[in-house]
Amino acid sequence: MELEFKELKEAIEEVELVDAHGHNLVALDSSFPFVGTFSEANGDALTFAPHSLSFKRNLREIAQLYGTQVSLEAIEEHRKTSGLDSFTTKCFQEARISALLIDDGLKLDKKHDIEWHRNFVPFVGRVLRIETLAEQILDEECPDASSWSLDSFTRAFVERLNSLVPEIVALKTIAAYRSGLDIDTHVSKEVAEKGLAEVLQAGSPVRIGNKGLIDYIVTCCLELAERCDLPLQIHTGFGDRDLDLRLSNPLHLRSLLEDKRFAKCRIVLLHAAYPFSKEASFLSSVYTQVYLDFGLAVPKLSVHGMVSSVKELLDLAPTKKVMFSTDGYASPETYYLGAKKAREIIFLVLRDACASGDLLLMEAIDAAKDIFSRNSIEFYKLNLNTNSSTPRSIISPTVEMKEPDVQEDSSSFVRIIWVDTSGQQRCRAVHAHRFNKSVKKNGVGLTVVTMGMTSFADGPAEESNLTGVGEIRLIPDLSTKQTIPWTKQESMVLADMYLKPGEAWEYCPRETLRRVTKVLKDEFDLVMNAGFENEFYILKNVVREGKEEYVPFDFGPYCSASSFDAASQIFHDIVPALESLNITVEQFHAESGKGQFELSLGHTVSSHAADNLVYTREVIRSVSRKHGLLATFVPKYDLCDIGSGSHVHLSLWKNGENVFPASDKSSSLGISSIGEEFMAGVLFHLPSIVAIIAPLPNSYDRLQPNTWSGAFHCWGKENREAAIRTASPPGCPDGIFTNFEIKSFDGSANPHLGLAAIMAAGIDGLRRHLKLPSPIDVNPADVAATLSRLPESLSEAVEALDKDEVLHELLGQKLVVAIKAVRKSEVEYYSKNPDAYKQLIHRY
């Protein structure tokens, strides 16, 4: 039989391993006992560890590796005489681990930092243990010199989490050790506050064991994981005696897994959940987001126990959802043993699966590569080379170690993208090597004036208080890092603005949206979803009378099939590119303008919607350019043709449910009271909001009656001439509306600032319980005498914004000052240069 499965054995022996869960190694003079690396026991219980099956087997394996006698004393003597670097190099070379993810929250005496481990493994990523972070924060002095409250702790905890996102590949919770896996994701603030008080009363150093507080912390981290697309590792099953095994059964996680707010959070159950491997297998088979890891169970169990546990995982779980790790810690021998035994056990399990007819040989080989490498690379988004024949020499500590986030060669670049106050998308590019080595952690320097620039000049607007003096850090948000679809050897990433790592700059658009989103969540337990409709022109360059000019790519009418035919090759590139970035495209069609098209995106939480819009604009412009064309989102490309908007559809969500629509037909408006108050706030503040979502003088050439752009300050049910309309998808009951649309948003707006302004207005409506006026059910232009117009110029909009104290408060006074200054400069310049708007096609 061995000869029959020789090909499988060779494939398993050759594959380079991605170790998805381990811990720090310690110095030789650490107080941590070497014998402790062979067992989960501690204290007096360790005296019995040498009599376990796994200990005896593992001792022989290490003795054989080092060429010593089979005794603990002989191995320890060899370690002392060889030195840590020497035997660590040997262990990792033999293990053939190409990537290692370290949870550095395990308290070990004299442990080495993560950077040290890069001397032995080409790629080392950090897994953040959330309970350890929370304890570190609570052990610090409260920022305002008073005792910690839940609000002050939450602010500090979330801020620290956000600052650490660029440095980590995953989050991890050890709730199983502290209060069990029956995690209440709807824990009340009162319960959490009481839990915090109990923890603080126990004194320092803080150890968080209160269930209410742990549930609250885990929920906060799930929100971050959802927002930043970070995986969450959850300890399940056995461990040391601090753990109540009964509470570590992963079936306790059902309520968390059923919470629709976190349905897209990728979760991995660690340690094969032993002895609950069957339960873990079941969860992985029925929940899309659940993955499995068998580290610790291999190599800490007997051979029979290891084989049995892994077989039970594969009883139901797809092979695409099972991942290798060693759970190595303290000594490099744990990594060697974990890797060696994993190869042996996976071979035995897959061999038996072939023998019993579950798998064909090639399917087994493919499954092995998935389990040992490819699944982790995809799950943790490591962008590593999955070639199983990678030479061993890359693990040598004498080779310069790199973090291969992107394929590095002379043409590998990473584009770091941000959007300024005037809505222009800008980027800095760095070599992939420099990005991986320093930029992804420390960012690049950027002059503060970039948030005071206008659409007509790359210089500061007067009165913005931003000049060429001063610098901030443009730090990549690694959760947004993507391979560029139209040039595969490059990547792009969105960036946040920091005064220094960990300290957000108050002018940062993405941070502004996060901050306002938090207010909506904290005060009303609501989340705003958004979906954008992108209108744009596709132009071609022609020469007329010796002069170059841009003219429409096509001249067909609204929803013309012939226009779609003309542009189909472009959309055959655009749509797959967007889908490769996980951006949902709902539909696209020819619009009313000559050469104008519209592409609608699916709705998602506001921060993701804004990020998606930035990438969507990048894709459409870049793909069009590759076809020799120019795509522009400028609001009014041709004063004699229809304008282009970026209409946004908005809804409110609570606990995974859309709470904007009325629960039944008894509401005359078709929306809930929460929906009415929020929308009423947006309608009330709309004259000042348009200064942000319609940021150019050219925007107001678009906002005209009878152009479906919403020129009048009113709302209506399915009224496309109203500035705000309530809308509903097909199949919804008559008279019930699931979202509302704002027509004035256009393609020159900064999407993060625009959504933040809309959300701030909605918060004001909720705080003051505002009510909507009667809807307008006719063309507003026909009753213009009874309605007021939205601002007819950017000057009017800026004047309204100047008086809007709510937006000043929630967006930030300094940011609003800069916005107003940029807008005033736009007004002055374009009033003196009326034809200058024609150049905007190259900026938007």
Image (cartoon, helix red, strand yellow):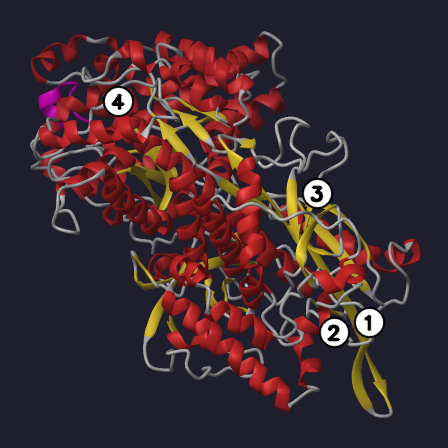
For the N terminus, give its image quadrant: top right
Q: Could one spot residue 491 in this view of the protein?
A: yes
Q: Which tag is nearer the camera, tag 1 or tag 3?
A: 3
Q: Residue furthest front?
A: 786
Secondary element at tag 3: strand
Q: CA distance from mark 1 to mark 3?
A: 26 Å
Secondary element at tag 1: loop
Q: Position of residue 207 (x, y in %)?
A: 15, 30
Secondary element at tag 2: loop
- Determine the image quadrant of residue 843: bottom right
Report if the CB atoms under discs 1 and 3 are less than 8 Å apart. no
Q: CA distance from mark 2 to mark 4?
A: 58 Å
Query: Relative to 339, does residue 684 appear above or below in the rendering?
Result: below
Q: Is residue 573 magenta?
A: no
Report if the CB atoms under discs 2 and 4 are less than 8 Å apart. no
Residue stretch rendered in magenta on the structure: 66-75
Residue 641: give its label. 1
For the C terminus, give its image quadrant: bottom right
The residue labelled by disc 3 is 727
- What amino acid is labelled 3 in the image? Ala
Q: Is residue 69 magenta?
A: yes
Q: CA distance from mark 4 to mark 3?
A: 42 Å
280 or 722: nearer the viewer: 722
The residue labelled by disc 4 is 211
735 or 579: nearer the viewer: 735
Query: Relative to 439, does residue 199 appear above or below in the rendering?
Result: above
